[in-house]
Each structure stands twice: as structure tokens, then as C-alpha cells.
Image: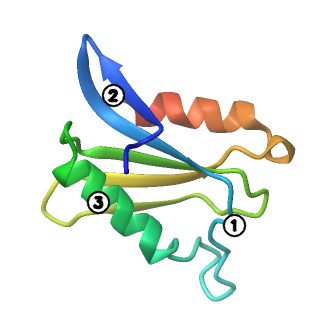
Amino acid sequence: RRPDILVRKNGKVVGIIDAKYMAGNDMLPSTGEGSMPDSEIVNQMIIAMDYGAKKVDLGIVLFADKNNVPVTIEKINEKKKIHFLSMHPENNPKNSLEELKKIIP
């Protein structure tokens, strides 16, 4: 499976973005933080980042779910990160776009 978007900077692919039209993750009442996203989505991103035609350290998943809670998964001892964000219109997409600007190097 290919990612939906390749993020390029100066002609070099620096990240991948995948859009999902499905439920994202929920907030954990015990911590107030986002829960772990679905393992199938996490695994799909890891495979695309590590074994895709363009190996990258940055993955971003955009959910169309208004209840998605932003969360970042980071691989220990490496610089790989996967960010999970909501782009639902009711969640002020401008805030998510600003967040994307901070995430993308």
C-alpha cells in the first residue's frame, strides 16, 4: 500500500501522510491523553516508513474523526515518529495545519 501524500523538502522525501476516513483513538480517562491508535494503522505506517520506496523517519496520519485525540508514537533510540491528528471540520482544521507546520522539518 502506498501513502496518500509524500512530503518533500528541497526535492527529498522527508515524510509521508496517510488520510483515514475512520474512527481514530479516544482519550484515556485515567491520564487525559490519547490512547494507542489501532495497531493495523501503526503497523501500516511503520512498514511504509521502513520498507517503502522512500524510507523516512516521519509519518503523519490524518483522521476525519472529530473525536480523535492527537497522539505521537516515537521509536526509542531512533528519530522515527508517527503523529496522529484530526482534520475533521468541527475540530478547526487550521489548528491541525499549524501543527503540521511544526511537525514537518
Residue at 22% from the left image edge and 46% from the top image edge: 52
Residue that badge 2 annotates: 105
Residue at 72% from the left image edge and 30% from the top image edge: 94
Residue at 32% from the left image edge and 53% from the top image edge: 81
Q: Position of residue 91 (x, y in %)?
A: 80, 47
Give the class, few, some or many, for how many residues have Cα within 10 Å of label 1's Cα (few <14, many ≥20). Answer: some
Q: Is residue 90 above or below residue 104?
A: below
- Callout 3 amino acid: Ile
53 sits to left or right of 2? left
Of the two numbered discs 2 and 3 on the same chain, state the one appearing first in sequence: 3
Q: Position of residue 57 (x, y in %)?
A: 24, 45
- Callout 2 amino acid: Pro
Which of the colour schemes (rainbow, by chain, secondary structure, one colour) is used? rainbow
Give the class, few, some or many, for how many residues have Cα within 10 Å of label 3's Cα (few <14, many ≥20). Answer: many
What secondary structure is found at the residue carrying circle 1? loop
Real-space CA distance between mark 1 and mark 2, rounded to the nearest whole angstrom:
27 Å
Residue that badge 1 annotates: 23
| Label 1–label 2 contact, CB within 8 A | no
Of the two numbered discs 1 and 2 on the same chain, state the one appearing first in sequence: 1
